[in-house]
Amino acid sequence: EADIYQTPRYLVIGTGKKITLECSQTMGHDKMYWYQQDPGMELHLIHYSYGVNSTEKGDLSSESTVSRIRTEHFPLTLESARPSHTSQYLCASSDLSNTLGGSLLREKLFFGSGTQLSVL
Amino acid sequence: EDQVTQSPEALRLQEGESSSLNCSYTVSGLRGLFWYRQDPGKGPEFLFTLYSAGEEKEKERLKATLTKKESFLHITAPKPEDSATYLCAVRPYSGAGSYQLTFGKGTKLSVIP
């Protein structure tokens, strides 16, 4: 059973506000991710982390920042929210285990329920 | 550029009416193709991983197959609870430490009682 939690589920804020979206997992997974999803569109990776103190930007440019101080926690911050940031934000973690002598990576992502952000 | 195209965008089936969803991909070396199910207001839920052409995986009424250019998700005798958006994703080969998946837009399946 996947245990990955995102808060808040819904957030409506005004332009210029600083916000932090929370993501926590209790599975001890090293890898964590933030995806952005608009209705009817693909999920796009905006940030990922290999482990504590390791973060990378994804393929979609984002003005958000992330931190990974603890294994279980991967918050995303927007310093000054704008209407263009309105979207669904999904957090995920992965279970990586080597198979077949390490030649294949059997990764599957566990997703949280997401935060729907609306910036007015 | 890696691409994933899913068809149809939406599919309505009567309960018990079997059908297939398609995922066509273009990648520079496939390290895995993934199927996820997403219910409204929730995050995607993992269904299958396929690694090589000819591979098949089954789970209840779902069966995923893989060729060198596409994957099919076959749904046999669907029930209303199978209604969801089904997402396909690929992981291309791009060196050690690559964790980036490329997702399709999904197929929204509605199963009518």
Image: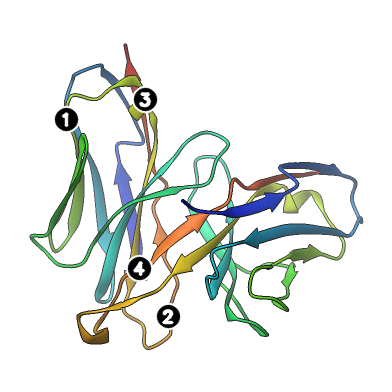
Q: How is the image coloured?
A: rainbow
Q: Residue A73: horizontal and vertical position, in percent?
A: 69, 68
In this figure, which residue is indicated by the disc labeled 3?
Answer: B81
Residues beneath discs 3 and 1 located on the same chain: yes
Give, as a three-letter code, the residue at label 3.
Answer: Glu
Question: Which SS class for mark 2?
Answer: loop
Q: Disc 1 to disc 2, how far (Cα)?
A: 35 Å
For mark 1, name the chain. B
Name the residue that disc number 1 marks. Answer: B76
Mark count: 4
Q: Secondary structure at mark 4?
A: loop
* Residue named by callout 4: B2
Q: Position of residue B38 (x, y in %)?
A: 45, 41
Q: Quadrant of the C terminus of chain A?
A: top right
Q: Are marks 4 and 2 on the same chain?
A: yes
Q: Quadrant of residue A113?
A: top right
